[in-house]
């Protein structure tokens, strides 16, 4: 939902609501109740949305933004906007505290702080007197090698096509863990992720692949995909999914189905658009995945 960001926007929204209601009443007077009811039905969703924006603004001003919920880390930008509104801080006042221009804060908020580093997010939070507690983004789940092994083998089994090289496999693991955190507040495999040039990479996955190879569970071959070198995987044993619940297996299946025909480049570009990679310097650990 759009967040009203200033008193000026608040007044304009109220005026817009009033204008729409006057328009309905005008039609009632000129064309009768049936025409008015038809217009009201047509405008109902828009009016409801505007009224919800007003109620949310008034609630923020009265009650504050509340505590930041770690599971909503991907929505950190909206939380900071709400915190500024609740604290009755203008964009210009926040800009002054950050040492940047007001247009820069405007750009931050239009993009909901996507692409802004953790250092800036921390400065904004301090200026607004709120706590993000980003390091507590996920519940404490230790790395579970057997679950990562099973996830890798499952993806190799389900997506045995030319697109499945090492880069794509790393992204499949990333989305399996990242989206499970968003759903359940904890990682599926417990692995940590590093922000590298081609997106987030699970810290232990390369060792897991070598371990599976040494145990004769998969075969790893080198091949070419266009001008690029690629690792290809041949499954020699079926994956043991007993470590996962039915819901977790369904989650892996949904990830596999959704990305089955995506190239590594497409998945890399997608991960570059998201908060975890954007908010982390290259070669550093992504805090979103850190156990609390």
Image (cartoon, rainbow, N blue to C red):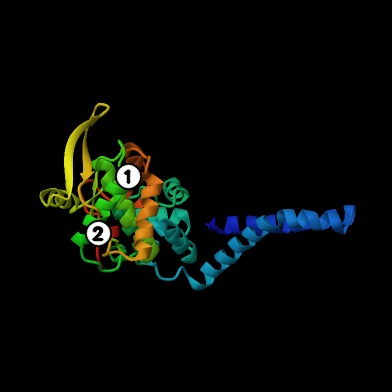
Farthest residue to the front: give it: 237
Q: Is residue 63 above or below residue 41?
A: below
Please give the name of the residue rendered at 46% of the width and 49% of the height, measured from the top-left corner. 106
Q: Which residue is located at x 79 percent, y 55 percent?
A: 38
**Image x and y of residue 278, in percent:** 32, 48
Q: Nearer the viewer, residue 235 or 229?
A: 235
Look at the image and tell me whether residue 125 can be seen.
Answer: no
Residues 68 and 224: in front is: 224
Q: Is residue 288 left or right of residue 58?
A: left
Q: Residue furthest left?
A: 214
- Report which residue position mark 2 lands on: 240
Residue 50 lies, in percent from the top left, at 63, 58
Identify whether 13 is placed above or below 129.
above
| Quarter of the picture holding the N terminus | bottom right
Q: Residue at x 59, y 55 (%)?
A: 9
Which residue is identified by label 1? 159
In terms of image quadrants, where is residue 75?
bottom left
Q: Mark 1, residues whose alpha carbon is within 10 Å: few (<14), some, or many (≥20)?
A: some
Query: Looking at the image, is mark 1 or mark 2 earlier in the sequence?
Result: 1
Disc number lying in front (1 or 2) = 2
Q: Is residue 242 left or right of residue 70?
A: left
Element type at marker 1? Answer: loop
Q: Quadrant of residue 270?
A: top left
What distance separates the C-alpha of mark 1 from that of mark 2?
A: 17 Å
* Label 2 residue SS: loop
Q: Which mark is residue 9?
A: none
Residue 167's image quarter?
top left
Quadrant placement of the C terminus: bottom left
Asked if residue 141 can be seen in this view, the reply is yes
Whole-percent x and y of residue 80?
Answer: 42, 60
- Residue 131 screen position, x and y as percent: 34, 67
């Amino acid at each position: 939902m759009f967040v009203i960001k200033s008193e000026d926007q608040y007044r304009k929204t109220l005026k817009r609501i009033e204008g729409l209601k006057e328009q309905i009443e005008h039609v009632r007077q000129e064309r009768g109740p049936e025409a008015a009811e038809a217009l009201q039905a047509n405008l109902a969703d828009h009016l409801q949305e505007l009224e919800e924006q007003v109620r949310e603004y008034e609630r923020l001003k009265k009650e504050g933004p509340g505590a930041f919920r770690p599971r909503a880390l991907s929505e950190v930008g909206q939380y900071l906007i709400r915190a500024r509104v609740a604290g009755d801080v203008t964009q210009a006042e926040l800009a002054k505290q950050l040492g940047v221009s007001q247009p820069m804060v405007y750009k931050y908020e239009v993009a909901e702080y996507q692409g802004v580093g953790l250092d800036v997010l921390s400065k904004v939070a301090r200026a607004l007197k709120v706590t993000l507690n980003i390091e507590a983004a996920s519940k404490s789940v230790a790395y579970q090698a057997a679950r990562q092994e099973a996830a890798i083998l499952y993806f190799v089994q389900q997506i045995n096509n030319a697109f499945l090289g090492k880069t794509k496999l790393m992204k499949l693991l990333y989305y399996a863990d990242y989206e499970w955190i968003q759903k359940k507040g904890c990682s599926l495999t417990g692995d940590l992720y590093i922000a590298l040039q081609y997106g987030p990479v699970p810290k232990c996955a390369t060792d897991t692949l070598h371990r599976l190879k040494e145990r004769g569970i998969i075969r790893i071959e080198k091949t070419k995909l266009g001008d690029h070198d690629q690792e290809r995987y041949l499954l020699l044993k079926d994956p043991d999914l007993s470590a996962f619940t039915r819901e977790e297996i369904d989650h892996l299946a949904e990830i596999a189905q959704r990305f089955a025909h995506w190239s590594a480049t497409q998945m890399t570009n997608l991960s570059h658009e998201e908060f975890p990679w954007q908010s982390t310097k290259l070669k550093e650990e992504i805090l979103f995945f850190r156990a609390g």
